[in-house]
Image (spheres, grey):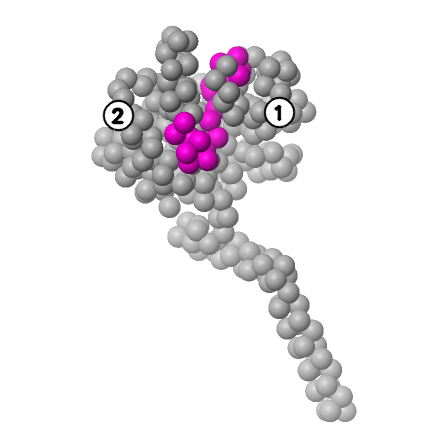
Amino acid sequence: MEELYSKALLNFGRKILRILRKPKKFLIIELTCAHLQLKENGQKNLRINRKNKRFVYLISPNKIKNEDFYTKLDQVLSSKKVSFFQLRLKKEKIINRIYIGKKIKKICKKYKVKFLINDDPMLAKKINADGCHLGQKDMNILKARKILKNKIIGITCHNSVYLAKKAVEDGANYLSFGAFYSSKTKKVKYRANLKILSLAKKLTNTPIVAIGGIKDTNYKKLLLNKVNFLAISSYIWNNKKLNPKEAINKLI
């Protein structure tokens, strides 16, 4: 009887070893363990479970005055932490936006960063950007899609599941929620809470961007809530303690 029991136990052990040796199975086990460790230990182990190292969605400052901006942008993008760059110059003349956009586009292409235009699908088409970002008061997604075809179109959803559902139905490529914190880039009309992130994840697999006052002291909390990208501006461009290169490097 003991011999039969030993053989059965041995066979069971061999089956377990065969499962663990399969690369796909091992990967699943490894990621699950990392996720559990992340929940238990908090932000310290954030790097264990984050597959996307390019988690920054970088937004331009409200004004680009000097040529040295392009050098700083090159340094920031060389960190390889940026997936998107959005040109947001609300008060700039169109001729200047075209000039600035073309220069930035070259730098983005160098580092394989997607270059987006804020609010203006026509400008995005004119300079052949990778897409555009739309606010709720801008052109709707369906009209923008006719202009931009298969390019990237993202949209602001504030703190609304309803707006997110509509954006998904209309074919948005990403959903932006916020502001999660006070922002120096623009006045905050809508505040978002972390609950909207879990609700959005249940609703869709469409990538989610968090926005609003994100910096080195609060960004990990959003990543822990499974945000795909973090929209950051003032922390990089208007940081009184760190230059842009130092600021991006503090986001690990």
The image shows residue 103, relative to residue 231, as above or below, that is: above
Residue type highlighted by circle 2: Asp
Residue occupying the point 26% across, 25% down:
68
Residue type highlighted by circle 1: Asn
**Badge 1 is on which residue?**
150
| Residue 231 at least partly seen | no
Residue occupying the point 23% across, 30% down:
240
Q: Residues within 10 Å of mark 1 (few under 14, many from 20)?
A: few
Where does residue 17 sit, x and y in percent of width and height? 64, 73
Q: Are marks 1 and 2 in contact (CB under 8 Å)?
A: no
Q: Which mark, residue 25?
A: none
- Quadrant where the image shows the N terminus: bottom right
Which is more N-terminal, label 2 or label 1? 2
Along the line of sight, the residue nearer the viewer: 27 or 135 = 27
Along the line of sight, the residue nearer the viewer: 90 or 216 = 90
Residue occupying the point 50% across, 14% down:
126
| Left or right of 223 on screen, residue 29 | right
**Badge 2 is on which residue?**
68
Along the line of sight, the residue nearer the viewer: 230 or 117 = 117
Where does residue 9 sit, x and y in percent of width and height? 69, 81
Q: Residues within 10 Å of mark 2 (few under 14, many from 20)?
A: few
Asked whether residue 43 is drawn in magenta, I would say no
Where does residue 165 sit, x and y in percent of width and height? 64, 26
Residue occupying the point 49% across, 44% down:
52
Part of the protein shown in magenta? 106-125
Secondary structure found at label 1: loop
Q: CA distance from mark 1 to mark 2?
A: 33 Å
Secondary structure found at label 2: helix
| Residue 17 at least partly seen | yes
**Res 164 → quadrant:** top right
